[in-house]
Amino acid sequence: MRTLLKRIRDSVFRVGWPRDERSAVRAMISSVTLHIHAPKVRPSTLRFRATWTLGLVSFLLLGILTITGIYLMFYYSPHPVAAFRSMKDLAFVVPFGTITRNMHRWGAHAMVIVVTTHMLRVFLSGGYKPPREANWVVGVMLWVLTLGLSFTGYLLPWDQLAFWAVTVGANMVGTIPGIGDSLRTLLLGDHSVGESALLRFYVLHCVVLPSLVGGLVAFHIFRVRKDGGLVTSEHEHEAAKESAGKGKGDGPKLVPSWPHLVYRELTVTLVVIVGLLVASLWFHAPLEPEADPTRTPNPAKAPWYFLGVQELAHYSAFWGGVFIPAAIVFGLCAVPYFDRDVKGSGRYFPRERWLANSLFIALLVFLTVVTVVGTYFRGPGWAFMYWPY
Ligand code: HEM
């Protein structure tokens, strides 16, 4: 029996538990999950401040959202008559329905925040500079797709919050000059949010967008490695360029990824899972009364991450709701093709990068302020309230 078990184990794991540097490197190369990593890494990339672990946390949240999302799909029907009932079933009948829904909901909010903060971390350290320009653009796409995933999921509970938030979001799409109306109809499958919109959002949320995000994340992580690993200092930026095939050099001393990187990743994984689990036991995902197209809340608000755009659209539908958001996305994609000097990369507030970093922080502060105003300081008729409560 022991021999049989050993045979089965050896057929799966080609290398035993790593006991020295040589077997650690062999384990990293021969395992399908571990070979995503380089067998050896620069010690500077292991420090918390190199990444704030945000790329990994984004990846973990995506995994948790996929698993919890599949479980929710087993019980969910994308039809106006059945969708809200599915939510009630998840709350009262389905085993682990409430905790799974809570984890999915809070995980989705966390993902928007974590992916945005990861983008901030990469920007501040100049991680978009050559040879990483294309990977930065892939990142911007991932940011937009993450918002799209959250937005399409928002409608699925089919409660008042979902219905009106998506109505407001779709109306913003409608303000795009020339093509707005057609785009809005394409998104909703009708002139207003209804049966067709629910089905389209369901397909986008469960099939189209996750496939795009999954494919792009795989490419993104592959490119992090191929571009020479993370940027951690000006010297290492050069070394990274060299190991990406753009020059020659000794490069810094490396340490094996097992156990140094893998153990750190396992620790972060544990913290993220336990943290999300505890938050989901404590706080329940909201569920308002069933969607009622005849009862418009005042004010009707978009999901929180679009409330900044809604606030800007209040001043001018086109300039605030379409032009500024589009300029931000295209501007972000263009940055690495203009700001190419690698001086100061790998440090957070180097003198050489004061202008780029100040502009980026100013942009984030601006977006945060308009989001907070839209969320807390706007009352009925979008009138300004001096005190939110
Ligand atoms: C689903 C979303 C995302 C996932 C799962 C993801 C994952 C990762 C991982 C695991 C790393 C390496 C570790 C780290 O830097 O923390 C990384 C690095 C990187 N990410 Fe992302 N990322 C995502 C979104 C983004 C976004 C929105 C941007 C920028 C707009 C971006 C740009 C980059 C760049 C340029 C690097 C290399 C940075 C360097 O060398 O210092 N990523 N990402």
Image (spheres, rainbow, N blue to C red):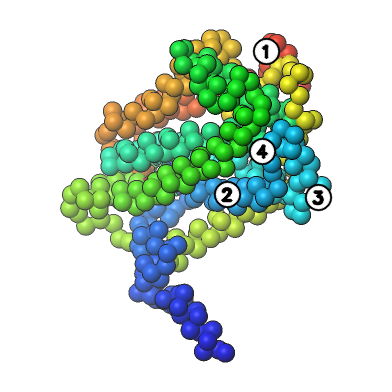
Classify mark 4 as within 8 Å of ligand 1 or not, answering yes or no.
Answer: no
How far is the residue under mark 3 from the one under mark 1?
A: 39 Å
Residue identified by numbered label 3: 93
The answer to which of 380 and 42 lies nearer the viewer is 380
Identify residue type, mark 4.
Answer: Pro
Element under label 1? helix
Does residue 354 appear in the picture of this structure?
A: no
> At which x and y percent is residue 260?
44, 63
Residue visible at 59% across and 47% down in the picture: 65
From the viewer's perspective, tell me whether residue 23 is left or right of residue 77: left
The disc placed on residue 165 is none
Identify residue type, mark 2.
Answer: Thr
Identify residue type, mark 1.
Answer: Trp
Residue identified by numbered label 4: 78
Residues at marks 1 and 4 touching, judged by CB atoms closer than 8 Å? no
Residue identified by numbered label 1: 382
**Callout 2: 10 Å neighbours few (<14), some, many (20+)?**
some
How far is the residue under mark 2 from the one under mark 4?
A: 18 Å
Whichever of labels 3 and 1 marks the residue nearer the N terminus, that label is 3
Whichever of labels 1 and 4 marks the residue nearer the N terminus, that label is 4
Whichever of labels 1 and 2 marks the residue nearer the N terminus, that label is 2
How far is the residue under mark 1 from the one under mark 2?
A: 36 Å
Element under label 4? loop
> At which x and y percent is residue 348?
41, 38
**Callout 3: 10 Å neighbours few (<14), some, many (20+)?**
few
Residue visible at 50% across and 59% down in the picture: 264
* Numbered circles on residues, count: 4
How far is the residue under mark 3 from the one under mark 2?
A: 22 Å
Whichever of labels 3 and 4 marks the residue nearer the N terminus, that label is 4
